[in-house]
Image: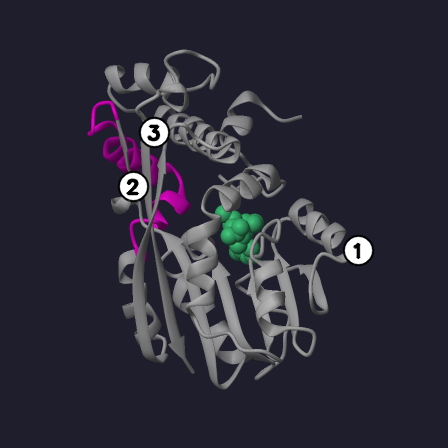
Amino acid sequence: MTTDEERRLNVAATGLVGTEATFLDAHFEACRREYEAMIRSVGIESGWHVLDAACGAGGFLPLISELVGPSGSVSAFDLAPDTVAVVEGRVSNGEFSCPVEVQVASLLELPFGENEFDAVWCANSLEYLDDEELPAVLLEFRRVLKPGGLLSMKDADGGLWLFSPGDPTFLPRAWAAASKVSQNFRGCLRTRSMRRWFEKAGFRDTWQRATLSEMWAPLMPQQRQYIAGQLTQIGALAERAGVPELDLEFWRSQRDPESPTALVNDPDLFWCEGHFVTVGRC
Ligand SMILES: C[S@@+](CC[C@H](N)C(=O)[O-])C[C@H]1O[C@@H](n2cnc3c(N)ncnc32)[C@H](O)[C@@H]1O
């Protein structure tokens, strides 16, 4: 049975924070314009065999399948069986423009042979790895990529998130607290240096670019759903980690998105989050 805290943390069957399928769909829709531009920028080509590593509910799969076209193919995997089941449903519904196969697997032990892929795409997921796991996973990506193959990732960076109106110190304080109890919040403070991690793992021709997703009231329904989900999630982690009482009052006031004090109902709301795309070649 899902507890109230688990619901606020948007967990999937794995128990990982921020990975539940409807939350992932709302996240993708809220950031769709920027996310599509990011993946279009990395250089995936027609006819390629691409790995979508930790694909979640498959938000990026329609565009990856469009980029590789009918002569290409996509393999995808995720640790969470419930989100993999969602992607299997999308494959059965014929939602993709090329063959897509999906399975349950771990980033730490890729179920693929050497030199299988022209490109690996990994979105919003390397943040779940600690500093020992990340280099091991980058080496796994090198193993499954063809010589010259392309590694591309996108993750959020917590230092590029803000909202207004309200006390501008609430969010950085909550993020710092959340990073003590949640690997993915900690991982989102490492994204800015991802290019260097790629280089240390032996990738060359690396580049990294920041993008902001800026959302203004009046929000579209998916933006409202997504921001409300982020606020309850960050608040639950801040509560778990322990932030000052005044901060807690604010985060608790965000639990109910229908409440007049909820930021998502504020006619002046501005919500901004920053991401990095990082690219390198084998
Ligand atoms: C925030 S979701 C992002 C999903 C998708 N890539 C997207 O951008 O919509 C993070 C995903 O990483 C997956 N994940 C976390 N750790 C993993 C691991 N060690 N191996 C495989 N998947 C993992 C989670 O199950 C989750 O689906």
Q: CA distance from mark 2 to mark 1?
A: 37 Å
Q: Quadrant of residue 272?
A: top left
Q: The disc labelled 3 sits on which kind of residue?
A: Ala
Label tally? 3
Span colored in magenta: 165-191
Q: At x 31% / y 66%, what residue is drawn?
A: 208
Q: Which residue is mark 2?
A: 161
The amino acid at mark 2 is: Trp
CA gap, disc 3 and disc 1: 42 Å
Mark 1 CB in 8 Å range of ligand 1?
Answer: no
Residue 107 colored in magenta in the image: no
Q: Residue furthest top?
A: 260
Element carrying mark 3? helix
SS at circle 1: helix
* Element type where label 2 sits in the image: loop
Tell me where residue 9 appears, x and y as whole percent. Answer: 49, 32
- Report which residue position mark 1 lands on: 92
Q: Position of residue 89 (x, y in %)?
A: 76, 50
First reached walking from the N terminus: tag 2 or tag 1 = 1
Estimate how packed mark 2 is, as few (under 14), some (14 to 19) or many (20 or more) residues with alpha carbons within 10 Å: some
The answer to whether residue 75 is seen in the rendering is yes
Name the residue nearer the viewer: 184 or 230. 230
Residue that numbered label 3 is attached to: 241
Prevalent SS, magenta region: helix
Labels 3 and 1: the sequence-earlier one: 1
Observer-nearest residue: 153 or 112? 153
Are the residues at dot 2 and dot 1 in contact (C-beta closer than 8 Å)?
no
Q: Residue at x 61, y 41 (%)?
A: 21
* Residue 175 drawn at (x, y percent): 30, 36
